[in-house]
Image (spheres, coloured by chain):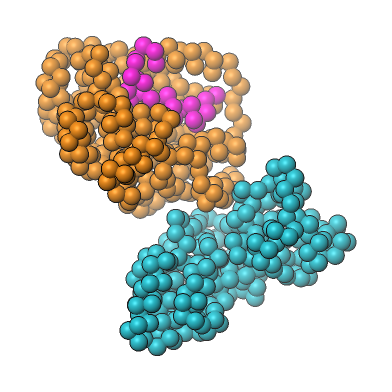
Chain colours: A cyan, B orange
Amino acid sequence: MRIGIDLGSRKVKFALVDEGKIVRLESFDTLAFYKRYGRMTGDDLTFDLAGTGLFSAAEVAAASIVATGYGRNTLNLKGVRVISEIRAHVAGALFQVGLKDFTLLDMGGQDTKVALVRNGSLQDFVMNDKCAASSGRYLENMSAILEVDLQELSSHWENPVRLDATCGIFGESELIGQILRGHPVANLCAGVNQTLVKRVVPMLKRFPSDQTVLTGGVALDGALVKLLENEGFTIVVPEHPQHNGAIGCAVIP
Amino acid sequence: MKKTGFTTTIPLEILLAAGRVPVDLNNLFIAGGKSQELIDAAEERGFPRNICSWIKGIYGAMIDSGIEEIVAVTEGDCSNTRALMEVLALHDVTTVPFAYPHDRNPDALRQEIERMMAWFRVDWETVNHAGERVESIRRKIREIDRLTWDDNIVSGAENHYFQVASSDMNSSPDTFEAEIDCFLAEAGARKPFRDRLRLAYIGVPPIIDDLYPFLEAHGARVVFNETQRQFSMPYGIADLVERYRAYTYPYDIFFRLADIEREIKKRRIDGVIHYVQSFCFRQIEDMVVRQRLGMPILTLEGDKPGPLDARSRIRIESFLEMLGERV
């Protein structure tokens, strides 16, 4: 039995896997999780996993724990095997979609990763750097400006309004300008989704594959999937895209 | 003795023949203990934020050190250097331009070298004499390099340090040579490293200060520092013009790649870190590097001096894990 933990910038995701089967998937707000259940002992961070109520004491006692995520690099996790995000996500994708050759596009709260997988192993990868404008956090900000929820934002892909700002913050004021010009909200939503496509396509084209596996919270954005398909990519979204990293931790050899 | 600064590696032999104290301003900037302050000062004076930190650091080091004379490499390095010369003229700094001819034409390079010699009022005899002196030190640095990849008893950081410092011989050839002798004596008694991975580091020297120890803590040692090695004129060529024609850094990427490919093969490299400086034209050359070197490459971008940021650490760790699964 193994518990996989993906310490993301927005959510901490958990996967409990036993004998190759996913038993349970859970998630928790990152800040709340650290505040309530994290504790520093010397240089080590310990989590009170049983205290979260997500796992029984018996499960916590029986399971080995593997973790990944942004938080792992600045913290020592006591009694936990730590692996890199890219490995976790590739392992998760291999487990979930059953493909051996694909390009992985993982779009999380802050990170965008593109990895080339051949014959089941990682060949090369790129990650966004310096800027997190192609991320879930960007979508959250834009939906707040447009006063629509994420579900609404992710349902529009037709007639995108052109948005050019390269910065997620300047992008907000650009969006406000387009609202004032009277564009329908649907087209503005499509425009926001199109900006994500513009940012990730150059990364994807570096590692072309017949199939692109899309994971991370942003994979729930159906409009993004549609727009990527319009660019000629065949997109595969696994059953649990948000938990892909946690699942990878729970299944990696 | 009068100090003469320079913006990138130049024929050091000429400065030494002229009795000048050579100061590689890159080394002064990065090793002087206040690199961020120097950049801040340059930005406060009006240098844009989205310009290479090295140019701001060189400017800051020049002003801070009070050096009054600079050899500025206007071709073969960075075009920002031209504007740097103009700004330094406002501070009454004497600037001596030096250009590496893009086509490596021997006559053009000889002319440039002789123009610089005329400025410093030295003839070929004294320059060649100074050349013999520095070549004797460079031979020892070549041995340090060999001990890195062949005997495996020198770390990536040590290899970096001695080669990068050879551009100005730490401003004092005699002291530097004594330091090298000491190091060689100490290193000779070491046990070889048992690295999991052997890396090549290509591109300009890093502005990041903890890259090598970070890599070594993860079982990966840099056994080839491309540009740093070039600074030490690694081919042992007797003729000065030919020596600086064989020096790859100021010429085109394909000339550099020929050296890189040869060394990667010789040194049994598992993976390459291509370091690029933010806002540098060499970032574009990454495309050529990736196409030509058929092996795993991590392109690492650095902007400001200091330790590796969390994101770069994640990328490096992932890269090393990936390499670990391949070897």
Q: Examine the image and state in which quarter residue A251 appears.
A: bottom right
Task: State the residue in front, A110 or A211.
Answer: A110
Residue B103 is at least partly visible in this image: no
How many numbered marks have been drawn onto this rendered protein structure? 0
In the current view of this chain or complex, which residue is farthest to the right? Answer: A58
The residue positioned 55% from the left and 65% from the top of the image is A109
The residue positioned 69% from the left and 58% from the top of the image is A34
Q: Using the image, determine if residue B311 lies above or below residue A148.
A: above
| Residue B159, magenta (yes or no) | yes
In the current view of this chain or complex, which residue is farthest to the front? Answer: B44
**Would you say B166 lies left or right of A116 here?**
left
Percent of width and height locating residue A51: 81, 61
Residue B129 is at least partly visible in this image: yes
Q: Examine the image and state in which quarter residue B201 appears.
A: top left
Percent of width and height locating residue A35: 70, 58
**Would you say A6 lies left or right of B135 here?**
right
**Would you say B207 lies left or right of B86 here?**
right
Task: State the residue in front, B209 or B222.
Answer: B209
Percent of width and height locating residue A43: 70, 42
Q: Give the range drawn in magenta.
A: B153-176
| Residue A229, magenta (yes or no) | no
**Would you say B35 lies left or right of B133 here?**
right
The residue positioned 59% from the left and 61% from the top of the image is A9
Q: Is the magenta stretch mostly helix, strand or loop?
A: helix
The residue positioned 26% from the left and 29% from the top of the image is B6
Task: State the residue in front, A238 or B115.
Answer: B115
Q: What quarter of the picture does the C terminus of chain A occupy?
A: bottom right
Q: Using the image, determine if residue B32 lies above or below residue B14.
A: below
Percent of width and height locating residue A47: 75, 55
